[in-house]
Image (cartoon, grey):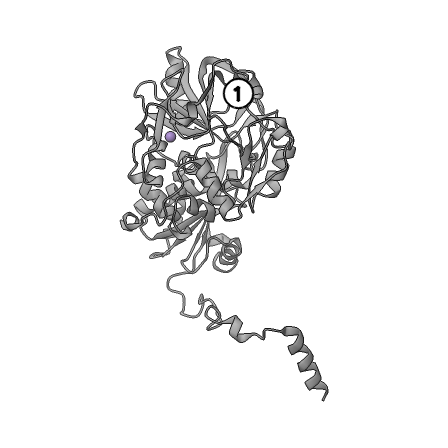
C-alpha cells in the first residue's frame, strides 16, 4: 500500500489564484459577468446557475471596485486539474501530500500586503455578497481562517462562515474542531485568539484546509506538498499569524474571549439553513490586500462548497479505512448525500462479514458519516445509478442492514437531535460462495470497443431515404 509514493505531478500547478483563473480562461471555463451585478442575491444567482459549468468573474459587483470570482471548482475533474493529476489519482495524491507535508517558507514581504487599511470598514472596503434567500446578510464564505495554537505556535487553517456584524466585527461559527480548541485555550487565560482570514488564495490551499488532519498539523504544509513547493508566507501587520504571501486579501483580527453574539441563519451544505444562535466574535484590526485584489466567494450549499469539502474528506476516509482494510479500493461521498453524509465504499471482499466491519470503521472515522453502502469492485461508485443497482440486487434488509442508534452525527442534519443521530450501513456486496453465474453482470461483448464512426453511416437522412425506397420497390 505504498504505491501512492509513485504518484508524481504531471503538470506544474499554478501557484496563485490569478494563475488558476488564467488556466481556466484559456480552456473556455471562465465566464465574465456584465459590470455591476448586484451583491445581494443577484451575484449568487448567476454563480449558482453556472455552478456545474463555468467559473465566473464579476467586475464592479454592486459598483464596488474589487471584482469577485465564484465557482473555482465545478467538478472533481477540475480539482484534479488544480493539483496536476488525472482524476483517478486525486485521492492517492491527496493522501501522499498529507503524509509528507512541506512546511511553509517565511518571506519578508508579499503582494498581499501592497495595500494596508488600519481603519477598517468591511462592507466599504470589500465587496461582500449575500448568498441564500434567508441568510442574515452578507457573509465571507471563502475565507481561510488561520489561527495559531497559543501554546505551540503551530498554525491551523480552516474555513468558517463569517457574518458581517459591524464595520469591524464578524460573527463566526466554530464547530468543535481545531480553531475552536485554540480559542478555548486562549479564552481560559482571558486572552483573545489572533487570527487572519485569507480571501483569494490558490484553490489548492482551500482544498488542503479541508483535510481531516490531526490537531497541530498545519494544513498549509499539506497545500505545499500538493503544489510541490512550500507556500510562501508573510507575518501579519498587527499580529503574529503567517498568511500566504500571494493571496489577494487578508483580514487581520482576534476572536474575542468571553464574547458571544447572534450569528445566522445561513444556507449550509445540507441545503438547509444553519440556525441563528450566539456565537464567537472576531474584532478586525486591519485589512491588507494586493494593489488590485480579487475577492472570492462561495455560494453556501452550492456545488463548489460540496466538492471542496467532499474530496479531502474522501481522501482521509480512504486512508483511515485502509489502515484496517487494505482491500478497500475507493470511496465516494455522493452529491445527494451532500458530499458529507452518504459514503459509498468499494471493496475487494475476502470474507462475507467484512462489509459490516468496514461500515463500523467508517462510522468511527468522521461523525458526519451517516449512511454507508459497501459495494463490490465491479460497481462504479462515481455513478449513483450503479450504487442503487447494487442495493437493488445485492442487498436484503433483514440480513445486510446495520443500524446504530444514538451515535454522534452532524448538528446541521435537521433530523438529528442536536447532533445525536442514527447510523445506517448497507452491505450491497454479493456473497463470496455464490454460484458463478448468479451475480455475474450481464454485458454485451465488444460494447466498449466498438468503433461507432465505422459502424454508422455518415449521412443518416440519405441512408434513411434509400432504405425506404428499397422497401417500396
Ligand atoms: Mn486542523
Frontmost residue, 309 versus 195: 195
- Residue extending furthest top? 190
Front residue of this view, candidates 175 and 52 = 52
- Residue 193 in view in this figure: yes
Residue 419 image point, x, y percent: 50, 31
The quarter of the picture where the C terminus appears is bottom right
Residue labelled 1 has its Cβ within 8 Å of some atom of ligand 1: no
Task: Count numbered badges in the picture.
Answer: 1
In the figure, is residue 240 to the left or right of 403?
left
Please indicate, yes or no, whether residue 402 appears anywhere in the rendered image: no
Residue at image coords 64%, 33% = 37
Q: Residue at x 46, y 17 (%)?
A: 286
Task: Say whether residue 246 is left or right of residue 384.
Answer: left
Residue at image x 49%, y 44%? 24
Image quarter where ligand 1 lies? top left
Reply above or below: 26 against 468.
above
SS of the residue under disc 1? strand
Query: Label 1: which residue?
Result: 171
Residue 18 image point, x, y percent: 46, 36
Nearest to the observer: residue 42 or residue 311? 42
Residue 245 quadrant: top left
| Position in image of residue 354 (x %, y %) | 36, 52
Q: Position of residue 97 (x, y in %)?
A: 32, 41
* Other-residue count near label 1 (Cα within 10 Å), few / some / many at <14 / 14–19 / ≥20: many
Amino acid at each position: 500500500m505504498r504505491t501512492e509514493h509513485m504518484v508524481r505531478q504531471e503538470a506544474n500547478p499554478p501557484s496563485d489564484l490569478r494563475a488558476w483563473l488564467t488556466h481556466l480562461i484559456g480552456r473556455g471555463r471562465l465566464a465574465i459577468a456584465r459590470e455591476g451585478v448586484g451583491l445581494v442575491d443577484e451575484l449568487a444567482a448567476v454563480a449558482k446557475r453556472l455552478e456545474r459549468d463555468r467559473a465566473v468573474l464579476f467586475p464592479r459587483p454592486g459598483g464596488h471596485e474589487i471584482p469577485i470570482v465564484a465557482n473555482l471548482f465545478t467538478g472533481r475533474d477540475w480539482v484534479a486539474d488544480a493539483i496536476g493529476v488525472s482524476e483517478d489519482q486525486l485521492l492517492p495524491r491527496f493522501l501522499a501530500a498529507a503524509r509528507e507535508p512541506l512546511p511553509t517558507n517565511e518571506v519578508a514581504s508579499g503582494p498581499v500586503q501592497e495595500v494596508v487599511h488600519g481603519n477598517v470598514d468591511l462592507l466599504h472596503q470589500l465587496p461582500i455578497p449575500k448568498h441564500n434567500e434567508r441568510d442574515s446578510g452578507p457573509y465571507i464564505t471563502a475565507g481561510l481562517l488561520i489561527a495559531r495554537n497559543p501554546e505551540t505556535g503551530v498554525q491551523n487553517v480552516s474555513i468558517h462562515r463569517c457574518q458581517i456584524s459591524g464595520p469591524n466585527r464578524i460573527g463566526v461559527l466554530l464547530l468543535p474542531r481545531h480553531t475552536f480548541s485554540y480559542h478555548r485555550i486562549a479564552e481560559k487565560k482571558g486572552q483573545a485568539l489572533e487570527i487572519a482570514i485569507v480571501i483569494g488564495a490558490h484553490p489548492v490551499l482551500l482544498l488542503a484546509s479541508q483535510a481531516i488532519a490531526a490537531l497541530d498539523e498545519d494544513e498549509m504544509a499539506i497545500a505545499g506538498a500538493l503544489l510541490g513547493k512550500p507556500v510562501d508566507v508573510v507575518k501579519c501587520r498587527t499580529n503574529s499569524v503567517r498568511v500566504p504571501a500571494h493571496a489577494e486579501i487578508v483580514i487581520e483580527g482576534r476572536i474575542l474571549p468571553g464574547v458571544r453574539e447572534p450569528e445566522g441563519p445561513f444556507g449550509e451544505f445540507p441545503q438547509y439553513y444553519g440556525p441563528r444562535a450566539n456565537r464567537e466574535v472576531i474584532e478586525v484590526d486591519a485589512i491588507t490586500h494586493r494593489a488590485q485584489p480579487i475577492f472570492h466567494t462561495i455560494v453556501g450549499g452550492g456545488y463548489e462548497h460540496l466538492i471542496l469539502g467532499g474530496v479531502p474528506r474522501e481522501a482521509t476516509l480512504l486512508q483511515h479505512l485502509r489502515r484496517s482494510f487494505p482491500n478497500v479500493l475507493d470511496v465516494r461521498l455522493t452529491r445527494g448525500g451532500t458530499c458529507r453524509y452518504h459514503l459509498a465504499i468499494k471493496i475487494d471482499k475476502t470474507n462475507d462479514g467484512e462489509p459490516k466491519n468496514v461500515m463500523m470503521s467508517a462510522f468511527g472515522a468522521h461523525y458526519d458519516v451517516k449512511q454507508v453502502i459497501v459495494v463490490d469492485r465491479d460497481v462504479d461508485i462515481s455513478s449513483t445509478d450503479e450504487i442503487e443497482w447494487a442495493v437493488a440486487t445485492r442487498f436484503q434488509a433483514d440480513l445486510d442492514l446495520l443500524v446504530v442508534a444514538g451515535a454522534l452525527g452532524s448538528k446541521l442534519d435537521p433530523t438529528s437531535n442536536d447532533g445525536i443521530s442514527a447510523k445506517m450501513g448497507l452491505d450491497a456486496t454479493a456473497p463470496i460462495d455464490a454460484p458463478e453465474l448468479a451475480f455475474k453482470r450481464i454485458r454485451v461483448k465488444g460494447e466498449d470497443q466498438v468503433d461507432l464512426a465505422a459502424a454508422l453511416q455518415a449521412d443518416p437522412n440519405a441512408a434513411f431515404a434509400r432504405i425506404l425506397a428499397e422497401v417500396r420497390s
